[in-house]
Image (cartoon, rainbow, N blue to C red):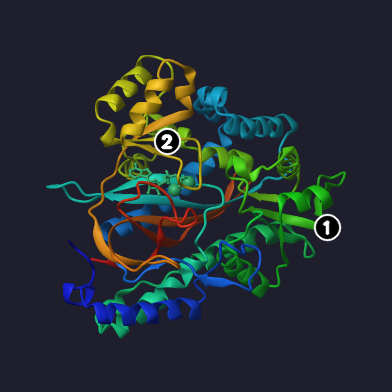
Amino acid sequence: MASSIPDEVMMDAALIKELVEVAKDAALLQGVLMRTEESPNSSELVTYAPFTLFPSPVPKSVFLQALAVQTHFNTLVDKISQDMDFLQEALASTIEVDDFTARLFKIHQQILQEGRSQSIVLGLNRSDYMLDQREDQNSSLKQIEINTISASFGGLSSQTPHVHRHILKVAGRLEESQRILDNNPAAGLARGLAKAWELYGSERAVVMFLVEVDQRNIFDQRYIESELWKRNIPTVRKRFDDVYKTGSLDPDKRLLVDGKEVAVVYFRNGYMPQNYTNEQCWDVRLMMERSQAVKCPDISTHLAGTKKVQQVLARPGVLERFFPDQPQVVQQIKETFAGLYTLDMGPEGDKTVAMALAEPNRFVLKPQREGGGNNIYGSEIVQVLKEVRGSPERTAYILMDKINPAPIQNYLLRRDAPLAISNCLSELGVFGAYIRQGAHMVMNECVGHLLRTKSSEHADGGVAAGVAVLDNPLLL
Ligand code: ADP
Ligand code: MG
Ligand code: MG
């Protein structure tokens, strides 16, 4: 089985053992860190964030393709967020049955009725891809999803190249070591936040990271915070509860939290139902959306990242509506789309059900959820669809073609897990950053990448979900 590293290295048990020790220390040295499960809110106990021993091969052409299409995805997400009729129509069936999406949509509608009090929007997203590598075909880049809220690992992935370079040198692979790409999404994401803060135009105002109750992945965020402090931009971390207790809107709808005016709210929380532990969290989300603070993302951009919207975008003629005079952009985006199928009530949805029941292993069934571990595969698809196929409940899901990358051998380094060689699949993420002020795009950039790798035994799940680990591409 393929790897970026020759078999004599992969199979040399003594060398691997030595490299693993070197690797863990290199990760700690470079700040590829996470807090531990047992103490998620204290840095007294930290460990390395899980990562691969070796980088994974990625064809150069698809890597460049993913980078090249990113600014178009930024534009697309931003256009969708401004198209009320489109969002309404796309999500109409979903919000009938999915409470979480319905609550977000209700806030979105309320903001529209009131009128937005801030014309600046900051988008920091991550478009994720896998390579479809069926036998006798070239590998093709297929989008898994785009994350328009709380896209993580831009911080840690700025450090992992140093770790892999070091491991490869110690392994005697100097040539490969020199081919590990530089990567610094943290700097680009921070540039977006800094620019939004500047446009807000108040020296005393702060950038507020809205963070989770448990903060295992705090170091990933600290890289971005640190970039902001370097620019003398004051940065605070607050939970929903803090904002509930100390936050308010002044008569001009300026957001004040703990006595400080907030210029930018950067959501690193609020992307899944469990984040809203009580009604007060929803009150706080609404208050922040109503405020003058720049939201990253605003509620409409959050909705633009739903899986239902992704499915609707893949319908014939829809992308053309957003890029009427740019057939090449439409083409470039479309090339990355896998097959996506509606489960709306009606003959088309019925056809999707029949197709999935006939060959469940060809598909993934996806609810409107984020954070990994929510999708449905194989025989479970049959089980779920048999339950919901006759009712509108089925419209909470979309169906997607399953992408099949060729497995690669690697060692996954994770605290408390025994060391073993695994067959692995990788997912490439590309970070986008943009700012729109009124009708004017002030910034639109691709700011870096992320490679995550998991054992092929796991169908689903990201790094935070404890399944995937951090990696780097080695371009072929
Ligand atoms: P989430 O928002 O929870 O991250 P994703 O759509 O990214 O949802 O799915 C989670 C994981 O499931 C992905 O990281 C990937 O490993 C796997 N996955 C999702 N869609 C597909 C697909 N179409 N083919 C193969 N694997 C998929
Ligand atoms: Mg997601
Ligand atoms: Mg994902």
**Percent of width and height locating residue 423:** 26, 58
- Name the image quarter holding the N terminus: bottom left
Q: Nearer the viewer, residue 78 or 229?
A: 229
Q: Is residue 286 above or below residue 126?
A: above
Q: 125 or 420, which is in the foreground?
A: 420
What residue sits 77% from the left and 53% below the top?
242
Q: Is residue 268 left or right of residue 373?
A: right
Q: Residue at x 43, y 77 (%)?
A: 24
Going by the image, does 357 lie left or right of 22? Answer: left
For the point 47% across and 70% down, the residue is 158
Label 2 secondary element: strand
Q: On residue 2, which mark appears? A: none
- Few, some or many residues within 10 Å of mark 2 (<14, 14–19, 20+): some
Circle 1 sits on which residue? 258
- For disc 2, the marked residue is 366
Q: Earlier in the sequence, mark 2 or mark 1?
A: 1
Cβ of mark 2 under 8 A from ligand 1: yes
